[in-house]
């Protein structure tokens, strides 16, 4: 009986040490709580991925700020089941921007290796930095 109770205590400790399992809505709520724009947030569809790899477990797209044409420049937040899928998707966006400045976008993967932010390249670097910082603070 003591061994069984010891096992329960150890298992509980290990599970609590694993931390919370965040989803994209937790992160976008963190953006909002930090005063960042999350306009017209919606779940991503296959059309939102375009020709990019569609390997995310879940994803949302949202307006960050309006551009010169008064249309929102978007951000995408995606959650992945594994690091390889995330890295492949990030590489796609990064390589696309290297091929043509017209396709440049900001990308950042979370320190836990589960989330990727991708934003329109015309969004100011300082604005993008705020989203990165907010995401990491939410995931801590």
Image (tube, grey):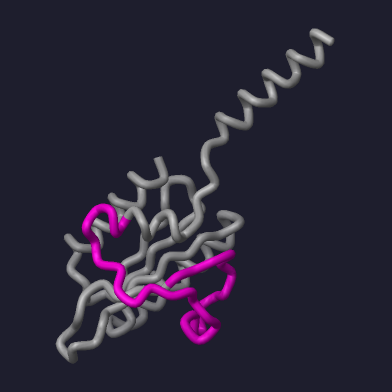
Quadrant for the N terminus, please.
Answer: top right
Q: Is residue 93 visible?
A: yes
- Residue 41 sits in quarter: bottom left
Q: Position of residue 139 (x, y in %)?
A: 41, 45
Which residue is pictured at 30% across the width and 51% down the height?
134
Which residue is pictured at 60% across the width and 55% down the height?
82
Judged from this view, the residue extending furthest toward the right is 1
- Magenta stretch containing residue 105, yes or no? no
Q: Is residue 99 above or below residue 64?
A: below
- Residue 67 appears left or right of 114: left
Q: Position of residue 121 (x, y in %)?
A: 26, 74
Of residues 101 and 27, the one drawn nearer to the viewer in this rendering: 27
Quadrant for the C terminus, please.
Answer: top left
Q: Position of residue 108 (x, y in %)?
A: 37, 59
Q: Is residue 35 above or below residue 111?
A: below
Of residues 51 and 49, the one drawn nearer to the viewer in this rendering: 49
Of residues 107 and 80, the one drawn nearer to the viewer in this rendering: 80
Magenta segment boundaries in residue numbering: 31-60
- Residue 83 appears left or right of 127: right
| Number of numbered discs overlaid on the protein picture | 0
């Amino acid at each position: 009986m003591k061994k069984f109770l010891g096992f329960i205590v150890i298992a509980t400790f290990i599970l609590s040490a694993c931390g919370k399992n965040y989803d994209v809505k937790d992160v976008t709520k963190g953006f909002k709580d930090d005063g960042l724009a999350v306009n017209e947030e919606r779940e991503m569809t296959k059309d939102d991925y375009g020709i990019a790899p569609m390997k995310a477990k879940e994803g949302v797209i949202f307006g960050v700020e309006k551009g010169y044409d008064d249309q929102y420049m978007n951000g995408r937040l995606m959650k992945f089941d594994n690091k390889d899928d995330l890295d492949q998707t990030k590489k796609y966006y990064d390589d696309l921007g290297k091929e043509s400045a017209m396709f440049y976008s900001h990308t950042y993967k979370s320190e836990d290796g589960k989330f990727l932010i991708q934003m329109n390249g015309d969004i100011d670097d300082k604005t993008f930095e705020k989203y990165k910082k907010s995401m990491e603070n939410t995931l801590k």
